[in-house]
Image: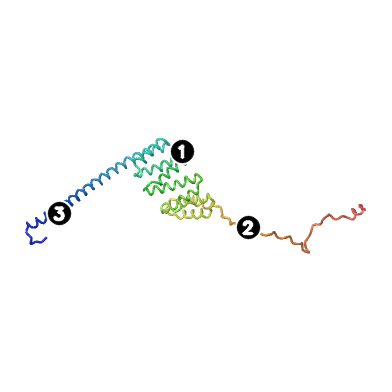
Amino acid sequence: MDDLQSEKEQIEEIRAWWAEYGRYVIAGVVIAVALMVGFNQYKSNKLAAELEASALFESLAGHVFEGDVDDAELVADELANNYANTSYAAQSKLAMARLYMDKSRDQDAADVLQELLAMRGNGALRHVGRLRLARVLLYQDKPQEVIDLLVGQDNKAFEGLYAEALGDAFAALGQVEAAGESYRIALADTSQTVNRGLVQMKLIDLPDAQPVLPEVSGPEPEASAPGPDAVTEPDAEPVSDDEAGESE
């Protein structure tokens, strides 16, 4: 603003500017305050939901420890329906899968783990769920489903564990070379998440791949005539002179 202008002119310009833009300034302030209040409310609600979900999950853990399937299922359903956006809902799937396996309900375990894989977010927990699902499928003697589940999964933290499960699946299908390659990938994992001794035993126990020899077709070779030095069996036993005389 020009310093030569009089104070009255400066005031008039400020009034004119405010008359034109003042409503935008007020609106901006109101929106900023509303956003701040809304964000604080969101954080407060999220924290409250996390605390409630945490209490429910603690209750679920107790039911799982006691082997109480019915009560555990009720709590797990509440977490899934009312607190689906919390990590506790995902963790409840892992807990229920363990409980189902303890009760020899392997298909229920597989189903609840599939539900975990279908959830959004919770990347690390979903990898844990995928690995446990692979082990359940191996228990169910479904090695091809394990391969379909794990092939193409690219995660360094789970690379060795996935490779071991793939090795088990390939071995179950009799694909010895693929199983050996997977076990070697698992052994190369330096994250110490793989039981290297166990994987080494699995690799050693793999049967050796036997090459398949091609069948040779064609006529069988003819028997060759005996050579001059060949020894042939006589057609009949020789008759002695005494026997010949008796016959006469």
N-terminal-most mark, 3 or 1:
3
Q: Secondary structure at mark 3?
A: helix
Q: Amino acid at mark 3?
A: Glu
Q: Is residue 99 left or right of residue 215?
A: left
Coloring applied to the structure: rainbow
Which residue is disc 3 drawn over? 20
* Residue 112 picture location, percent across and down: 42, 42
N-terminal-most mark, 2 or 3:
3
Give above or below for 191 relative to 111.
Answer: below
* Residue 196 picture location, percent across and down: 47, 51
N-terminal-most mark, 1 or 2:
1
Q: Residue at x 40, y 47 (%)?
A: 126
* Residue 175 picture location, percent across and down: 53, 53
Q: Secondary structure at mark 1?
A: loop
Of the 4 image quadrants, the one containing the N terminus is bottom left
Which residue is disc 1 drawn over? 103
Which residue is disc 2 drawn over? 215
Judged by depth in the image, the label closer to the viewer, 1 or 2, is 2
Label 1, label 2: how far apart the Cα atoms are: 52 Å
Is label 3 in contact with label 1 (beta carbons under 8 Å)?
A: no
